[in-house]
Image (cartoon, rainbow, N blue to C red):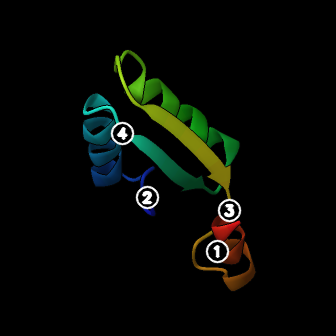
């Protein structure tokens, strides 16, 4: 989910996880990933996968399709 580490995106990721979804989020930095993981900690179901990359960069974004 692009934007999953932003203020609104974090809430959406949390809601999806709460419903048992697998959510894949591109992250620009390890700090962004850590902040997101701390925010969703304690959500009982679902699976969060964070993949380093920048969606605004064509080559980086293409890496998400593999």
The residue that disc 2 covers is: 1
Query: Under tag 2, what secondary structure?
Result: loop
**First reached walking from the N terminus: tag 3 or tag 1:** 3
Residue at horizontal 31%, vertical 36%?
14
Residue at horizontal 75%, vertical 80%?
59
Query: Under tag 4, what secondary structure?
Result: loop
Q: Quadrant of the N terminus?
A: bottom left
Q: Are marks 3 and 1 in contact (CB under 8 Å)?
A: yes
Q: CA distance from mark 2 to mark 4?
A: 12 Å
The residue that disc 1 covers is: 61
Q: CA distance from mark 2 to mark 1?
A: 12 Å
**First reached walking from the N terminus: tag 4 or tag 3:** 4
Assess disc 2: are there few (<14), some (14-19) or many (≥20) residues with their C-alpha within 10 Å of its C-alpha: some
Q: Quadrant of the C terminus?
A: bottom right
**First reached walking from the N terminus: tag 2 or tag 3:** 2
**First reached walking from the N terminus: tag 2 or tag 1:** 2
Residue 32 visible? The answer is no
Assess disc 3: are there few (<14), some (14-19) or many (≥20) residues with their C-alpha within 10 Å of its C-alpha: some
Q: Residue furthest bottom?
A: 58
Mark 2 or mark 3, whichever is nearer to me: 2
Query: Under tag 3, what secondary structure?
Result: loop
Q: Which mark is residue 53?
A: 3
Assess disc 4: are there few (<14), some (14-19) or many (≥20) residues with their C-alpha within 10 Å of its C-alpha: some
Q: Are marks 1 and 4 in contact (CB under 8 Å)?
A: no
User: In the image, is residue 45 above or below residue 2?
Assistant: above
Q: CA distance from mark 3 to mark 1?
A: 7 Å
Q: Are marks 2 and 3 in contact (CB under 8 Å)?
A: no
Q: Position of residue 31 (x, y in %)?
A: 63, 40
Q: Position of residue 40 (x, y in %)?
A: 39, 28
Q: Position of residue 57 (x, y in %)?
A: 66, 80
Q: CA distance from mark 1 to mark 4?
A: 22 Å
The residue that disc 4 covers is: 21
């Amino acid at each position: 989910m692009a934007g999953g580490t932003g203020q609104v995106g974090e809430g959406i990721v949390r809601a999806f996880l709460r419903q048992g979804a697998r959510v894949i989020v591109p992250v620009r930095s390890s700090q962004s990933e850590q902040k997101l993981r701390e925010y969703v900690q304690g959500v009982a179901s679902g699976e969060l996968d964070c993949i380093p990359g920048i969606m605004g960069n064509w080559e980086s974004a293409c890496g998400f399709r593999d």
